[in-house]
Structure formats: C-alpha cells, structure tokens
Image (tube, rainbow, N blue to C red):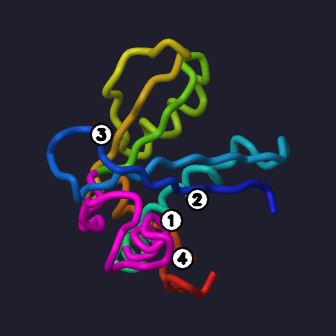
C-alpha cells in the first residue's frame, strides 16, 4: 500500500436543498518513492468514478449512519435522507502547489481564497469530466462494485 483516498460526506451548507450532501475528498501518497508518478491522479479519478457509479448505495449508507442505522427515522434531525451529491470538494493548503496542481489538472476549480487556516477550496461537479474520466482511464474502476472492496 502506498497511500489512501477517502470520502467524507457532509450535509450541504448552502440553502439549495436539505437533501443534498457534499463529498469531500482526501488523498495521501505516503511513500515518497511513489510520488510524482501520476498515481494520485489515477486514484482520485478512479475513486470519484466509483463513488458516482455507486451513488445510491453510498447515499443509503450515509443516511443509515446519520439515522443510527435506521433509514426511516432519523433520531438526530427531522431532515430527509440525502438524495443527491451536490459536488466533490477538496481543501488544500495554499502553499501545497503539487496538490493544488493535481486537483486542478483533474478538473477541480478554485472557489475560494485562502481561509483563516490557509486552505483553498476547490470543487468538481459530480457529473463532470473529473468524475467521468476515472471510468475511461482507470481499469480498476471498471472491475469493482460497491461492497466488494
């Protein structure tokens, strides 16, 4: 294993819909000898495609977690279960030029100036090129379905 890629789902903090969630991505290539070889870009593309392809199951699992395992009654809130992933986002330190370049070259666009912590937010549309390129470019994305990993 050379690193990992993660997805964190959050309720959308805009007022568009109470049923929307945002997918925040994180990636780490831990082994220095594996960096700079395009593996992070391939992992991000494959993972985004995998999430989009498995979206109903991903949202259902998120809803069960929010409801304490019960999708019919959410004990924490009267909000409906999520029905849509609004967008993918990443938050990257303004000085992390390599990571900013990785995500910008993968189809993400900057949507903010650095915040108090020096982080820049970038976003990609769920149905956009960034999410779809994984299916086209990454063989592993075509071989696994949700629940097999």
Tell me residue 96's x, y (percent): 61, 23
Mark 2 and mark 3 residues within 8 Å of each other at the beta carbon: no
Q: CA distance from mark 2 to mark 3?
A: 27 Å
- Picture quadrant of residue 33: top right
* Residue farthest to the top, as pictured: 116
Q: Which residue is mark 2?
A: 43
Circle nearer the N terminus (2, 4): 2
> Which range is magenta?
60-86
Mark 2 and mark 1 residues within 8 Å of each other at the beta carbon: yes
Circle nearer the N terminus (2, 3): 3
Circle nearer the N terminus (4, 1): 1
Q: Residue 139: say if magenta.
A: no
Q: Which residue is mark 3?
A: 13
Q: Which residue is mark 4?
A: 139
Q: CA distance from mark 3 to mark 4?
A: 35 Å
Q: CA distance from mark 3 to mark 1?
A: 26 Å
Tell me residue 50's x, y (percent): 46, 71
* Residue farthest to the front, as pictured: 75
Between 128 and 38, which is closer to the camera in this rendering? 128
What crowding class fits label 1: few (fewer than 14 Cα within 10 Å), some (14-19), or many (20 or more)?
A: many
- Name the residue located 74 percent from the left edge and 43 percent from the top edge: 35
Label ID, residue 46: 1
Label ID, residue 131: none
Mark 4 and mark 1 residues within 8 Å of each other at the beta carbon: no
What crowding class fits label 2: few (fewer than 14 Cα within 10 Å), some (14-19), or many (20 or more)?
A: many
Q: Please determine whether, in this image, residue 6 is positioned above or below residue 66.
A: above
* Residue farthest to the left, as pictured: 16
The secondary element bearing badge 2 is classed as helix
- Picture quadrant of residue 133: bottom left
Q: CA distance from mark 2 to mark 4?
A: 11 Å
């Amino acid at each position: 294993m050379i690193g990992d890629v993660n997805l964190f789902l959050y309720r959308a903090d805009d007022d568009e819909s109470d049923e929307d969630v945002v997918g925040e991505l994180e990636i780490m290539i831990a082994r220095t000898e594996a960096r700079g070889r395009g593996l992070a870009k391939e992992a991000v593309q494959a993972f985004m495609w995998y999430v989009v392809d498995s979206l109903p199951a991903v949202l259902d699992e998120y809803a069960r977690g929010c409801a304490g395992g019960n999708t019919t009654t959410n004990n924490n809130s009267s909000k409906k279960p999520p029905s849509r992933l609004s967008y993918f986002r990443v938050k990257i330190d303004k000085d992390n030029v390599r990571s900013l370049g990785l995500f910008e070259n993968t189809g993400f666009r900057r949507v903010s100036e650095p915040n108090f912590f020096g982080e820049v937010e970038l976003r990609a549309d769920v149905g956009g090129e960034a999410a779809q390129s994984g299916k086209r470019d990454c063989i592993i994305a075509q071989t696994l379905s949700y629940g097999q990993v």
